[in-house]
Image (cartoon, rainbow, N blue to C red):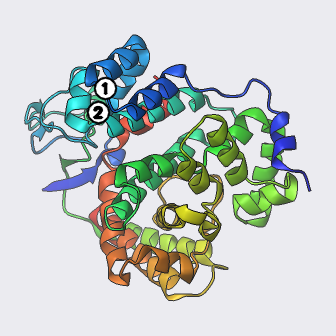
Amino acid sequence: MAKKITIQRVKPGMKIIKPVHNLQGVALLQEGVVLNEKYISILRSWGIPEVYIEGGEETPDDRKAKRREAFKITKEIERKFAGVIKNKIMDEIMSIAKKQLAEEIEEG
Amino acid sequence: MKDVRKIVYKIENLPTLPTVVSEVTRLLKDPLTSASDVSKVISEDQSLSARVLKLVNSAFYGFPERISSINHALVILGFRAVEDLVLMASVFNVFSKDSGGADFSRAEFWKHAIGCAVAAKIIGEKVRVISAEDLFVAGLLHDIGKVVLDQYMHNDFKEIVGVVKARDILMAEAEKMVLGVTHAEVGGWLAERWGLPSWLVKVIRFHHQPEAAGDSFREASAISLADILCRAKNIGSGGDNKVPSLKSRTWEEMKLPLSSLEPIMKELSQQVKRTGVFLALAREGK
């Protein structure tokens, strides 16, 4: 099963499952390539935001870890916003941030 | 209460921008200036040209073809955009060095600054301001006073960072307690010394109190919002870990509907992913 991950999370040893192209359409990495430091730095220097890597189904442990991370981030945002003036804009920004950060964790 | 001039007098060997920046600004004020005049001035500084071209060719701009010369960049992006890039590439070069302080990460600082630049540009496309591209530069430079303090008044700055940590307050509040002036005032002063346009000086100086920015109220408001959105979405860190308040008046000045916040914040995270080259330049300076 393929899993889409952000460039910040790629690590040597991960296997590319979909070819990666730069903006000009030139293939940078082919399907099946196993990432190493050099390949990762190529992806970074081209500003590639995400890649598809090989990965199994999400395990219950993965889900639990994600939930824990989402909870932590929610608490952290509430702490950051503690003490700001109460108005509808600040409330709205806080609730959107919570929602979007949780979604980003879900997407990996 | 110490005043900002007394503080900055302590700063020896002021950070300066290369003369090519003011030279480009001067040229662009002259309506008879041609692309080749500007390109000649920039290209004389080979390292600066290389940095500008790196930014232009980065994923952030996403041009389908490689832009290979300053002249080419001027034709495709226009004079103003290249002027902005020259300024940004020069600032990265001046301030890339890490001061070695454990509690203030220059990398996180630049991540926050670049995030603010992106957010400011997105807001600038929806609000009637000077221009979205100019707001990008303002977002990038709004906290520049922090780097000045870190680099030139390192011991005071360490104390400030300590107060921020101990009390969990905004950097500007700790600066007032320790120094009597804030990074916004120091940054505004530096921008003035560098001869940057007066709206930009005002935006830097008043990004924590936009209503004081006079005829640049709206631009300062946009930067203030950009800063808040980056903090809310954990994009880098300016050295503190709180969110400042946005007053209703500041929000109203931008005439944005409340419903625009969600797409702006979504777009922000998307675009920040493409700013790797900016971050690399900011960290390495070359």
- Name the secondary structure under disc 2: helix
Q: Is residue B20 above or below residue B140?
A: above
* Quadrant location, the N terminus of chain A: bottom left
Q: Is residue B273 above or below residue B59?
A: below
Q: Could you tell me residue A63's position as x and y percent? A: 33, 70
* Along the line of sight, the residue nearer the viewer: B127 or B118: B127
* Same subunit, tags 2 and 1: yes
Residue B2 visible at all: yes
- Name the secondary structure under disc 1: helix
Which residue: 39% across, 24% down?
B51
Find out whether the residues at labels 2 and 1 contact each other: C-beta distance under 8 Å: yes
Q: Residues within 10 Å of mark 1 (few under 14, many from 20)?
A: many
B57 relative to B87 in the view: left or right: left
Which residue: 17% across, 38% down?
B63
Q: Residues within 10 Å of mark 2 (few under 14, many from 20)?
A: many
Determine the image quadrant of residue B269. Answer: bottom left
Chain ID at mark 2: B
Which residue: 32% across, 67% down?
B126
Residue under label 2: B56
Three-letter code, disc 1: Leu
Which residue: 42% across, 30% down?
B86
Q: Could you tell me residue B242's position as x and y percent? A: 63, 67
Query: Of the numbered discs in the image, which one, if any, rests on residue B53?
Result: 1
* Along the line of sight, the residue nearer the viewer: B10 or B54: B10
Name the outermost residue toward the right: B1
